[in-house]
């Protein structure tokens, strides 16, 4: 059994050191190419419209106001070029907007159910008074 593979003479493949043979051949010098790709991601969102709606229409526990403040801070950071700061403030504004929307919706639904229930009871009370006469 031979130590050298077929087609490779012993003097062409040194035991140590660098082999400058043909590219793609075993032991040949390899060239590494690096490619840099700049990905321009979209600018961070500040959710200013959502914050304005939460502030004007449903502002439970002043969450709409807090969301509006963070949205304005996010927009300021974006204009200043601090995209990480804008992302942070925008994320906080989004979270506050979600809470304001959920709480506002729950309060609206509960209020609607209570008003419908009160109207129904008032009608029943009026009907019973008219039947007693």
Image: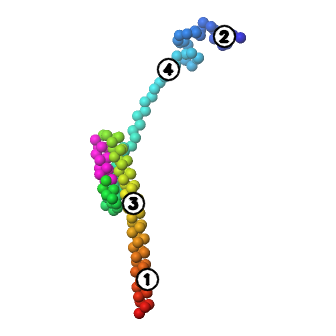
In this rendering, the answer to whether 4 lies above or below 118 is above
Residue 99: quadrant of the picture: bottom left
Secondary structure of the magenta portion, mostly?
helix
Q: Is residue 72 above or below residue 103?
A: above
Name of the residue lying farthest toward the right: 1
Q: Foreground: 7 or 83? A: 83
How far across and how far down the image is residue 112, in percent?
40, 70
* Magenta-tinted stretch: 67-80
Circle 3 residue: 103
Q: How many marks?
A: 4
Sequence-first tag of 2 and 3: 2
> Is the residue marked by circle 4 packed among few (<14), some (14-19), or many (20+) residues within 10 Å?
few
Residue found at x 41% / y 59%? 102
| Among the two numbered marks 4 and 1 on one chain, the one whose residue lies closer to the N terminus | 4
Find numbered disc 3 in the image and state the secondary structure of the residue it sits on: helix
Q: Which mark lies nearer to you, 4 or 2? A: 2
Residue ID for mark 1: 124
Measured as percent of width and height from the top left, residue 4 is found at 65, 11
Indicate which disc residue 105 carries.
none
Q: Quadrant of the C terminus?
A: bottom left
């Amino acid at each position: 059994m031979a130590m050298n593979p077929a087609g490779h003479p012993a003097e062409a493949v040194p035991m140590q050191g660098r082999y400058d043979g043909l590219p793609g051949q075993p032991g040949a010098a390899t060239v590494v190419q690096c490619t840099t790709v700049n990905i321009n991601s979209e600018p961070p969102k500040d959710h200013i419209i959502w914050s304005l709606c939460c502030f004007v229409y449903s502002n439970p526990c002043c969450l709409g106001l807090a969301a509006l403040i963070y949205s304005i801070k996010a927009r300021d950071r974006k204009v200043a070029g601090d995209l990480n700061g804008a992302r942070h403030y925008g994320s906080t504004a989004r979270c506050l907007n979600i809470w304001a929307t959920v709480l506002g919706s729950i309060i609206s639904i509960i209020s609607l159910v209570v008003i419908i229930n009160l109207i129904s009871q008032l009608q029943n009370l009026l009907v019973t008074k008219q039947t007693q006469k």
